[in-house]
Amino acid sequence: MSVDTVPVESAAAISAGQADLRWDLLGRLVRQKTFIAGAVIVGFWILAAIFGNLVVPHDPLAQDLLNINQAPSSAHWFGTDQLGRDMFSRVITGSRDILIIAPLGTLLGTVVGTVLGLVMGYFRGPVDDGVSRIVEAFLALPLVVTGMLGVIALGPSDATLIVVIGLVFTPLIARTVRAAVLQERDLDYVAAARLRGEGSLYIMFAEILPNVLGPIMVEFTVRLGYAVFTLVTLSFLGFGIPPPSSNWGLEIFSNYGVLTAGYWWEVLFDALAIASLVIGVNMIANSIETTLDES
Amino acid sequence: MAIFILKRIGLALITLWILSVIVFFAAQVLPGDPARAILGPLAAPSAVAQLSHQLGTDKSVIAQYLTWIGHILTGNLGTSYEYQAPIGPQLATALVNSLKLAALAFVVVVPLGILAGVVSALNQGKRVDRVVSVFGLTGTVIPEVVSGIVLILVFGIWLNVLPIQASTPPGASFGTQLYHLILPAIPLVLILFGYIQQMARAGTVESLTSDYARTATLKGLPRGVMIRRHVLRNSLLPTITVIASQTGYLIGGLVLVETLFHYNGIGTLIYNAATHKDFPMLEVGVLVIGALYMVATLGADILFTLLNPRIRYRGVQ
């Protein structure tokens, strides 16, 4: 009797069971108050990024030099900046670049980090040792410093920022995936696959990967929060998205010099917008983690 | 034990070497010709070539790396492009300043974080626990730009009770320096508080539910004594490692906070070097913070081993 004809539960039944489990997890996730609150906040900023330009009362780039540094009023809800641009419109549309670059960078880091982590955890030995040293070297530097180095090395652009965020997150995600793979690699199903004569690639990506997706998902959302954090910080330091885009970090960078003149509205609303977005992302991350922990 | 420590030091040195290669290539090789960057796009090619020769950047990349790392290992940190002065003394001043700020943040946040974590754990699931935990988690995720700006606005400008310039004139008294560092230290405290609180909380919860805690309770030990003698000793061990591993975050935070509050520390040194393309300064600065991080994590590992009897005894055998 060949291996193929050994009666097992049908593949359809197994995948149906997995689908049920996934729906169950999803159901429990969306019923959490933290998740709903986080999703509402993040959803708001995503809508603002996509449709913001259509609904804001003023053109966020339109200068009005007769009305510079105006305090909040009924005409300008959040006041105007040093060039007379409407702060409310700039804050609402200021999420766009952040919400494009941060997820793409995080995705890049997650994909590369996952592949690296799978290879390190599955093969162990010299591959693991070698890559671990490089990972350690990257981890020795704060995100902001690695980010600045990356921007200096590659020149400032959106693509650079995506690559830099991806690069910075790769070792962190690789480390998490590696740890998860180490727990899986000696389990029976991996040994069974090896006995069936499956190749290393198949075992890593078709057998182990689906079983470590949980930690990867948590890691992705947590990192997304940090991506926003890093991006905003880099922008504030002048190493982020170049002007005239109105992203929040750059906005604070350009306007915090006039804080002492009393023009608080030119930075405070941006700061609060940043805070709301990172808190929203982290609420989602926390609720995913809680849901996976409970199961 | 000695072998363990030697092995850890060896690994740290290898990591540091890799870091030096990464830093060198990122700052010296990828951005293009440093002489051109210094002299600007209008300079004559002959002048650029001459400066390249003077800086040694006309040699092969590997030769440049070997010269650079050789100088650093022999204590010659090089000359800053921007200031045309040796890097060593500037770096020393900046490090001392950053150390003051970091020390203030640590002195505040470590006891506060541990206390809050233990209080949370003892009131697990109750309102106090939820409020403290949510506050801590929120603090760790909010960028220092945001907390810094809000603090400057509220305490520096609206209430006008604390200075928003962290630097003090030379020769300022300890008290004055401390007074100027209060506001900059708060964003760092907010970032670190949540981690330490969560770690202390988790450690305390774990040892509260352990067999030895139950035994202590069952043999009639008063709750206070049981917590002091049995729970805290065990719960604070993992917290030590977390505190040391936060050094990296702390230094990242310094870059931002020092820039925001105009403080002459290692963070501003790296930031200024990066904005002015002062590559020798940038490379040394980054290498130094990498080394600091490695020393801190190494120290934590060793401390953890020394404090943990299970590892200590196994090491001796």
Image (cartoon, coloured by chain):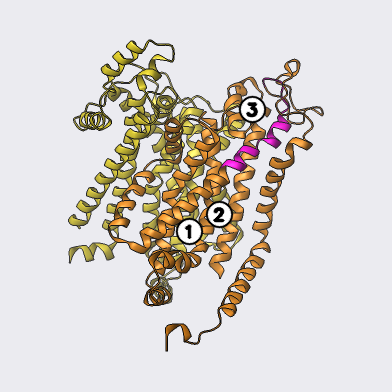
Q: Which residue is mark 3?
A: B158
Question: Camera-side residue: B302 or A187?
Answer: A187
Image x and y of residue A93, in percent: 69, 36
Precedes in sequence: disc 1 or disc 3: 3
Callouts 3 and 2 on one subunit? yes
* Chain A color in figure: orange
Q: Is residue A69 left or right of residue B204?
A: right
Which amino acid type is shown beneath numbered disc 2?
A: Ser
At label 3, which amino acid type do we have? Trp
| Distance in Å between CA atoms under marks 2 and 1 | 9 Å
Which residue is identified by label 2?
A: B133
Q: Which subunit holds the residue at mark 3?
A: B
* Residue that numbered label 1 is attached to: B201
Q: Colour of chain B?
A: yellow
Which x, y percent locates residue A19?
61, 71
Q: Which amino acid, mark 1?
A: Arg
